[in-house]
Image (cartoon, rainbow, N blue to C red):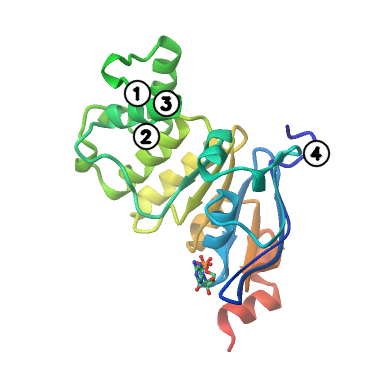
Amino acid sequence: DTSHGRILYLDEVSVSFDGFRAINKLSLDIAPGELRCIIGPNGAGKTTMMDIITGKTRPDSGTVFFGSTIDLLRYKEAQIAALGIGRKFQKPTVFEQLTVFENLELALKADKGVKASVFFRLDSAQGDRLAEVLRTIHLAAHVNRPAGTLSHGQKQWLEIGMLLMQDPKLLLLDEPVAGMTDEETARTAELFLSLKGQHSLMVVEHDMGFIQTISEKVTVLHEGSVLAEGSLAQVQNDERVIEVYLGR
Ligand code: ADP
């Protein structure tokens, strides 16, 4: 349910590790179909925030809602994934021995909980979906290649494709273009722009050129809370942001 105009809502979320406040009264919301970039220096709390959203870390206090009705703090990590929140870590984790097709098929099986995989056949709707995902991730020409033979960028796209097979409402992506060539980065920007609208995306990135290409709104985290929010130009000209990145 997105009737209140947000797919994700964090209010005054805090968590401490051994007395250290990694997340400090963090409030943030994401609109349906939005592509939000999250930036911030090392240790700002970006990873911990994603751990909280995905149920890996439980906050000490605060509210985390998915849509306007689902209280995410009542769910476990696997249930949160099943609700339609997909997460991609920085390093690609695809099955290197399997082909591109088999990786995508496996992602669908995992989602459907199909155990007897030898008997699993894609129905026509699933086949159509797989073909559409292949085009979206720019791998239609490589469908029968073992994933291990793909470039770093192609592996990243394949992993995004595996998430897309499960049709997530919200995708959380950690430094998706790290280690990519300029051309791969440009194609990833294209890919994200094609996903937005149908999916909401939260992207943690350091590559400002990439952020400039894809994002309308940028959130700057610092010491576990939101320091600034706005267009990239706005936050880059914000004195507090400049101080955090350049100062001290
Ligand atoms: P970012 O992803 O922005 O670099 P993190 O969320 O990884 O920041 O970390 C925020 C702060 O919380 C850091 O100071 C980090 O050392 C600390 N931290 C994160 N996870 C843990 C943990 N499990 N135990 C102790 N400290 C942690």
User: Mark 3 highlights which residue?
Assistant: 113
| Outermost residue to the bottom | 248
Question: In the displayed structure, would residue 74 be above or below residue 237?
Answer: above
- Which quarter of the picture shows residue 118? top left
Residue at 56% over, 49% down: 55
Taking 25 as reference, is 131 left or right?
left
User: Mark 2 highlights which residue?
Assistant: 138
Q: Earlier in the sequence, mark 2 or mark 3?
A: 3
Q: Which mark is residue 115?
A: 1
What is the spatial separation of the Cα atoms under label 3 and label 4, in whole angstroms? 32 Å
Mark 3 vs mark 4, foreground winner is 3
> Identity of the amino acid at label 2?
His
Q: Earlier in the sequence, mark 2 or mark 4?
A: 4
Residue at 32% over, 43% down: 154
Q: Residues within 10 Å of mark 4 (few under 14, many from 20)?
A: few
Q: Residues within 10 Å of mark 3 (few under 14, many from 20)?
A: few
What is the spatial separation of the Cα atoms under label 3 and label 1, in whole angstroms? 6 Å
